[in-house]
Image (cartoon, helix red, strand yellow):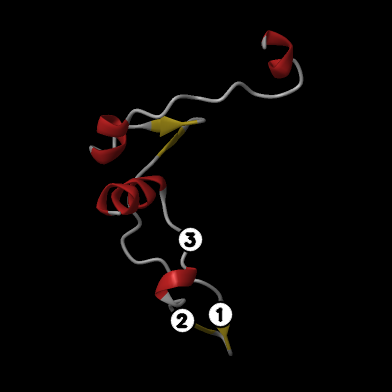
Amino acid sequence: MEDMWRTRERPEPLDYDAILSESFVLRGEPQTRAANVFHGALNGTLHAGLKDQQALTLPESLDLLISS
């Protein structure tokens, strides 16, 4: 199993409590909820994507997992 990680980065275990408290850091970047993310631009104006087509942050993904 050790030879699996010779050419790849070893996965980092997720700490659910740290993710929910927004203190979890993944690869040097804090994982927080996005306040209001806009996706794409149409004729120079920003528009919100459809709810089922939005990219979720790590905390938002965990919230969705917990609620399912």
* Residue topped by disc 1: 41
Who is closer to the viewer here, 39 or 56? 56
Question: Above or below — where is 56 with respect to 16?
Answer: below
Question: Above or below — where is 61 with respect to 22?
Answer: below
Residue 50: where, in percent of width, then height? 44, 77
Quarter where residue 20 is shown = top left
SS for tag 2? loop
Residue at the extreme front? 68
Residue at the extreme top? 2
SS for tag 1? strand
Of mark 3 and mark 2, the one earlier in the sequence is 2
Q: CA distance from mark 3 to mark 1?
A: 15 Å
Three-letter code for the amino acid on which mark 3 is drawn: Ala
Three-letter code for the amino acid on which mark 2 is drawn: His
For disc 3, the neighbor class at 10 Å (few under 14, some 14 to 19, many from 20) is few
For disc 2, the neighbor class at 10 Å (few under 14, some 14 to 19, many from 20) is few
Three-letter code for the amino acid on which mark 1 is drawn: Ala
Kindly indicate whether the residue at mark 1 contacts the one at mark 2 (C-beta within 8 angstroms).
yes
* Residue topped by disc 3: 55
